Image: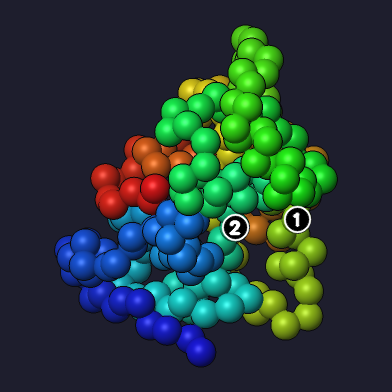
Amino acid sequence: MPDIILRANTLAELKARLAELDIEVPARSEGRKPCHAERYGIAHLLATLPAGRLSFPLTLTHRDRPDFLLAMPDGDDVGIEHTEAVPENVARAQFLRGRGLGPDVYFTPHVTPGEPRKTAAELKREIEADAPGGAWVGDSPEREWAAAIAHYVKEKLPKATAEGFVRYRANWLIVYDNWPLPTVSYAKAATYLAPLLMEIGAFSVFDAIFVHDDSHMCEFRDAPANHVLRPLQAPR
């Protein structure tokens, strides 16, 4: 069932409603669900968007296919879909680590988009071994990031055009970046991701694509734009 998250008549009221939202994201070992990350992402998006991109009064509803409806006057409604860029094996390893397996500090693993699912026994051996693996050189983190984000966007394209997925005047995609990498320069990485999004036809499905971690948000529409996130409660 659709769930109205907030209503706001002014920008000041929107900021107040956002500050009141419960956007805590539990650890994977503590009952984390997709809806937790979805609310975290939409709150940051609305807090980060320039005021001129919104009109009032507005209503934000949590629903399905797409995940959110941002209803605004004059038919300027926006359907907003959400996805998380995280390798399945890494997510499962995070669950195991949260249950006490392996060291508290560990090496960042090398992963590839769409890699085969590992067995629980394989994951446990890797966690306990904590092998350093190879190093990232030059701009390889930025290029790997761009390839990973493009992979998850591409996965969403057929879903966002399938029967039963409601399309609105504008359609956006939020990608929560939880891809394991050393520090990434978002400004540089965005220049690698932008042509990949064009290549897969992402903008024939989504009018804007937002990619965020816990401190920055990249917007892809015309030229890439980088925003600093408003400091809100961060997921673990």
Distance CA(mark 1)–CA(mark 2): 10 Å
Helix, strand or loop at mark 2? strand
Which of the 4 image quadrants contains residue 177?
A: top right
Q: Position of residue 201 (x, y in %)?
A: 78, 50
Residue lying at 50% horizontally and 66% vertically, measured from the top left = 33
In the depicted view, which residue is nearer to us: 137 or 222?
137
Horizontal placement of 140 versus 48: left or right?
A: right
Q: Nearer the viewer, residue 223 or 159?
A: 159
Badge 1 element: helix
Tell me the amino acid under the disc marked 1: Glu
Query: Quick check: 56 above or below 181?
Result: below
| Mark seen at residue 155 | 1
Determine the residue positioned at 60% across, 35% down.
Answer: 127
Residue 111 position, x and y percent, is 70, 33
Give the residue type that dot 2 points to: Thr
Residue 200 shows in this picture: no
In primary-sequence order, the first of circles 1 and 2 is 2
Query: Circle 2 sits on which residue?
Result: 83
Q: Farthest top residue?
A: 138
Q: Percent position (x, y) of residue 7?
A: 29, 78
**Could you classify mark 2 by the number of other residues whose Cα lies within 10 Å: few (under 14), some (14-19), or many (20 or more)?**
many
* Residue 21 visible, this orientation: yes
